[in-house]
Image: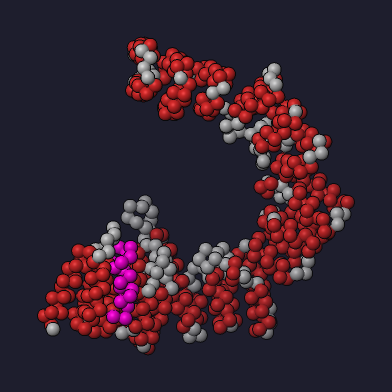
Amino acid sequence: MASKLQQKLKKLFDSKPPPDALSAELHVLASEHGFAECASFWMPTLYQTSPALFQTFMESILHTALWPPAIIASLLQRAEADGQEKVFELLYRSQWHTAEEWNEELLGLVRAPLTDEALLQALQRRMVTHHAFSEATAMALYRRAPLFQKLVRDNVPHWWHGDRSGFLALRKAVRQAGDEAWYWELFRAFASREEWAEEINQLLAIQVPPEQIVAELEKRHPSYDRFKQPELVRELIQRYGTSLLPYVQAHLRWLAGGQEERFLQVIHDLGDETLYWQMFFTVGTSDMWNKVLRVLLKELLERDAFFNLIEQRFPRQDRVVQRWQRWQLNRDVALALYQRDPHRAAPLLKPYLHGADPALFRAAEEQQDEEFLDFLTLHFMGHLSSLLYRAYPFSHWSQQADLKARREIEEVGQIVTARLDRLYTESPEGYVRHAGYILGQVGAYGIWNPKGNREHNPIFIYLMTQHPEAWQHSPAAIQELMESPNIYIQRLALDILGQGSAASAQRVAENLTVFRTLLLNKTRRNSKKKALHCLEEAVRQCPDLGEVILPLLEEAMDFRSKRAIPEHIMVSFVRLRRQLRATS
């Protein structure tokens, strides 16, 4: 098979077709079995015919097979000798080199009888791999001539790169040459733990002035925090105190070195409480934080003094990401703080609550703290939503239901829905005011599992299904739902208003701007159909609304997009116009 293909290739080259025809024929032959085995014939022949055509053809097929290394090596020599830089780069990139093989090749070039300029060009042609110089390569070039110093500097690894020598010889040579900037750059990249410790001990021994210590430490600071020396760091802090703050703040996590409590004790001994808590909330943990708060809770302090200290021991609000921040209060700490002073504690607790604690909910009920209870209702609803995947796993998952999670969902759901029942019994208007506020706080992506929530989350089910007539009579509550950034909350409003009543017609009239937005934006088609149904029901209940709703529909009919529903809008428009004519 290969011999027949080689005969075809020989016949093709002997016919000397134009370049375009030759390229087209080669692409056809390249699809035949045995093309790679014939490379020893057609590769040199094609290169001899036209290096430019060889480059173009190889770019298109180089990835399709493993080409004979001997042929590639031979062509590399020819391309380099002929000055065919692009062909050389293409073939060189196609070869697989280990770092050791690549560096050995470079050292072979250094030993070859080449002028410095020719050697530099040969090296630069080979700088197309991801490898870095070994110390042997770097030293050979650095000693050769100043011409190679930039090449060495650019290709020495800038971090520990598998070469365990630490580039000691290169560092020594660079320092002897008086290049201090590069020496310290190499030191930061390659110095060992012991070398760094020796440098720091020398700084401590010569007693560097406080105004210079930060610059000296930065000069020596290891790249990428490869190792930690917390003991030496603590000695530095004890020696230099606040003079060291810029360095401490720049490298705080590295300085703590996995021994956060001991490090923070050193900072605390400096006597600056503000600084200490700033450092604490950078390197500390939630467990450490809860431990500190428990100690403070045991102290018999006057209320104002206690909360002044507590506020100092909470993360600054401008540094807290409300949804994904890492600080979490344990249940016992949150409950104890709330019981100490509900009014002052509640705003502090909100960003840091974790899970759903029935005891905290009951404590808020005892205080009749309805605002905090609204927050807890939303928080608990979100927590129960996070349990659904464990408590009610999808049927296609090979996972058993978590009965503990189910019991928690039931217990928390009973406590919260009992409070919602109480609110409705006391005042339907009061209930929808609170429920509207709760649902209005749900973010655009706050409901991740709508089907699971509708089926198994008792708080979600209650808020989304109970007392629709009360919602219809509350302009403020319906407005909260209609203006929600969450489409599932908006759809709740559409379901309520679509039930048809004089009150719901009035709510539709009050929210026509939102209905117009729903029909014109990228809302899903089913939601737009719900909005249309609400508008039709509103006109049936109150024909006078036709004068404002018909122009809205007429405008929306002209809107064309992937999610537009002009046909449905047209049907509603015609139906309402006939209805109005019949009643006029």
Tell me residue 176's x, y (percent).
82, 36
**Residue 461 appears left or right of 375:** left
Count the labels in the image. Answer: 0
Residue reaching furthest bottom? 426
Tell me residue 400's x, y (percent).
38, 56
Res. 66 in view: no
Determine if the magenta segment contains residue 517.
yes
Residue visible at 60% across and 67% down? 319
The quadrant where residue 583 appears: bottom left
Which of 256/549 is in front?
549
Instruction: Please identify the dominant SS of the magenta region.
Output: helix
Query: For the N terminus, which image quadrant?
Result: top left
Residue reaching furthest front? 18
Query: For the C terminus, which image quadrant?
Result: bottom left
Determine if the magenta segment contains residue 483.
no
**Residue 154 appears left or right of 443:** right
Residue visible at 36% across and 12% down? 15
* Residues rendered magenta in the picture: 509-527
Residue reaching furthest right? 206
**Residue 197 appears left or right of 551:** right
Which of 140/223 is in front?
140
Res. 429 in view: yes
Residue visible at 55% across and 26% down? 85
Tell me residue 126's x, y (percent).
60, 28
The quadrant where residue 516 appears: bottom left
Residue reaching furthest left? 582
Tell me residue 322's x, y (percent).
52, 68
Instruction: From this view, report whether residue 250 is shown above or below residue 59.
Output: below
